[in-house]
Amino acid sequence: MCGRFTLSTDAQFLSDYFDLDRVPAGFEQRFNIAPGQSIATIRQVRGVGRELALTAGAPQA
């Protein structure tokens, strides 16, 4: 069974809500994210602050 999900929140809301220091250019809402696709992740980077990064999804079985 495939675990698809959505990310319907826009970059400006995420930036304000999580007090992000950086959001990647080209970030957009996505409504059918499948395993294996890149996903938005909020991470804390030492010396930089919080940022929104796109990370690789799970490998296909």
Image (cartoon, rainbow, N blue to C red):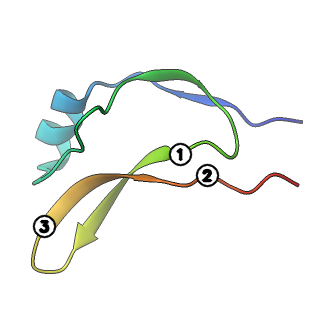
**Label 3 SS:** strand
Question: How many numbered callouts?
Answer: 3
Q: Residue at x 14, y 51 (%)?
A: 20
Tell me residue 57's x, y (percent).
Answer: 61, 52
| Identity of the residue drawn at 28% across and 24% down | 10
Question: In which quadrant is the N terminus drawn?
Answer: top right
Residue 49 is tagged as 3
Q: Report crowding for label 1: few under 14, some 14 to 19, many 20 or more residues within 10 A (C-alpha).
A: some
How far across and how far down the image is residue 14, in percent? 23, 37
The amino acid marked with disc number 2 is: Gly
Which residue occupies 49% across, 44% down? Answer: 39
Disc 2 to disc 1: CB gap under 8 Å: yes
Residue that carries the numbered disc 1 in the rendered image: 38
Q: Amino acid at mark 3?
A: Gly
Give yes or no for contact between labels 3 and 2 (Cβ–Cβ under 8 Å).
Answer: no
In the displayed structure, would residue 43 be above or below residue 8?
Answer: below
Q: On the rendered image, what quadrant is the C terminus found in? A: bottom right
- Residue at (10, 54) in percent of width and height: 21
Q: Earlier in the sequence, mark 2 or mark 1?
A: 1
The numbered mark at residue 57 is 2
The crowd level at tag 2 (other Cα within 10 Å; few <14, some 14-19, many 20+) is some
Q: Establish if 52 lies above or below 9.
A: below
**Residue type at tag 1:** Ser
Which of the two labelled residues, at mark 3 and mark 1, occupies the earlier sequence position?
A: 1
**Disc number lying in front (3 or 1):** 1
Residue 37 sits in quarter: top right
